[in-house]
Image (cartoon, grey):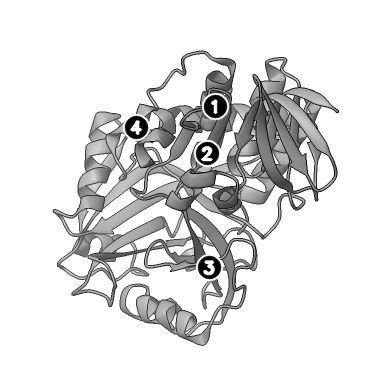
Amino acid sequence: MNAYDVIIAGLGTVGSATAMELARRGHSVIGLDAFRPPHNRGSHHGQSRSIRRAYLEGTGYVPMALRAWELWRRLERDTGTSLLVSTGNLTIGLPDGPALKGFLGSARTGNIPHHALTAAEVRKRWPQLAPSDALAAGLEVEAGLLFPELSITTLLNESERAGAVLRFDERVEHWSKHGDRIRVHTTRETLEGGSLLLAAGARNKSLLGILGDRLSPKRVPVHWVAPPSEKAFELGNFPVNFWQLPAFEIESNTQYAELYSLPVIGSGGCVKVAAHNNLSDCDPEAPVRFVTPEEVADIRSFLGNFIPTLANCTIDSDVCLYTQTPDGEFLLGALPGYDNVFTAALAGHGFKFAPVLGEVLADLIAGTEPAFDVSRFSPARTV
C-alpha cells in the first residue's frame, strides 16, 4: 500500500494550490482527480474569473484577499506566466443594500483605492451600462481578472516540480480512518496517508458523510455574448461589473438577484455574463449540461435592462458548478471529530483566494497556526 504524508482528493481551485504549497514545504503529497484538470466538469473553467480585494462579502475576507493578490503575482514571477490582468471592478446595487455597503466597508478597512459613484456617473463613464437612478456603485480602481484554466495548469505544474505526485482520471470513492492514519480507496487502489484533504468541489457532498448534507451543489449557466463592438467591451473600456438588484428592478426568487459580467479578453472574445444566485440544485455526478432557452431568455432580459447593447447579440452558453454552504461562507478546516481530515468548499466565490487558501490549509494540515483567523469558516459551525 503506497503511503504519503498528505492525500488530496480534487485538484481544482484549492486542491492544486494546497498540493503546491505542501510539496514546496517538503511533505510527500499525492493529489487525485476524477477527471483531468483543467476540465469543464467542476468550478474552475470558463476563461476568466474576477479578483477583487474590497470584498463585499465582509471585511473579514480582506486580509486574505490582499495576500491572495500578492501570491498570484509571486506565482507569475516564479513561472514567467501571466495569470492576472488588472482592471476596474464595479459593484452596483442599492445605496443601503448589502453589496454596496459591504464593498465600501471592505475598501475603507483595507485602505483600498476606490470611488463611490451615482448611477448617472456610471452611465456617463461607461455608456454600455444602464443602472437606474435608484442604484449606486462602488469602483475598486485596481481589481482584476484571472485566467482559471492557465492558473490551474500552472499550480499543478509547480506542484509536480516541487515533488507532488498527481494522478488524473482516478476518483476517490470513499475513505476510512485506521488508528492515526487515513486510508483512501480510489477506482484503482487503496492509499494511506497521515492526513487527507477533501477538495473535490461539488463532489465533496458524497465524501463528507453527515457534513455533506449541508452542502448544496448548484448548477450555474454561464453565457458568452458576442458584442457588436469588441472595443467598447474590452479590458480598459469595460470594467468587471457585479449587480445586486432588488426585486423591483428584476424578477427574482430572493430579495436580491445577483449577476455579473466580465470584459472581452483578446481578439474575437466575448463578454462573459452569469447569475450568481437564484441557482438550481443539481446532482454533481450528472448535472444537466444543456442550457435551456428559458435560461438564455432570462439573461437577455437582464442585458436588455442593464447592458442593452448586448441584448440581441449571439450567445453561447455552458454550465459550471457551485458548492453552496448554508450561510454562503467558506467551509475550511478539519472535519468535526477528526484531526487529520480536512475539507474546503468555497460557496461560489473562492477561486481568487486559491493561493492563500493553499497556505492556510497547508498550515492547518501541518498543525501550525495560519496567518489568518479562519475560525469563521470552521466546518463545525454547520453541524
Identified at 26% across, 52% down, the residue is 99
Q: CA distance from mark 4 to mark 3?
A: 30 Å
Q: Earlier in the sequence, mark 4 or mark 1?
A: 1
Q: Which mark is residue 222?
A: 3
- Residue to which mark 4 is pinned: 376
Amino acid type of the residue that numbered disc 4 sits on in the rendered structure: Arg
Q: Position of residue 320 (x, y in %)?
A: 57, 62
Amino acid type of the residue that numbered disc 2 sits on in the rendered structure: Ala
Q: Position of residue 119 (x, y in %)?
A: 21, 63
Answer few, some or many: residues within 10 Å of disc 4's Cα (few below 14, many 20 plus, some between 14 and 19): few
Q: Position of residue 139 (x, y in %)?
A: 31, 48
- Asked whether the residues under the numbered discs 2 and 1 touch, taking CB atoms below 8 Å apart as contact, a structural biologist would say yes
Identified at 54% across, 27% down, the residue is 361
- Asked whether the residues under the numbered discs 2 and 3 touch, taking CB atoms below 8 Å apart as contact, a structural biologist would say no
The quarter of the displayed image where residue 355 is located: top right
Amino acid type of the residue that numbered disc 3 sits on in the rendered structure: Val
Counting every numbered tag in the picture gives 4
Q: Earlier in the sequence, mark 2 or mark 4?
A: 2
- Residue to which mark 2 is pinned: 344
Amino acid type of the residue that numbered disc 1 sits on in the rendered structure: Leu
SS at badge 3 = strand
57 relative to 221, above or below: above
- Residue to which mark 1 is pinned: 361
Q: CA distance from mark 3 to mark 1?
A: 29 Å
Please state if 171 lies on the left or on the right of 42 as rendered.
right
Q: CA distance from mark 2 to mark 1?
A: 9 Å
Q: Earlier in the sequence, mark 2 or mark 1?
A: 2
SS at badge 2 = strand
| Front-lying residue, 166 or 270 | 166
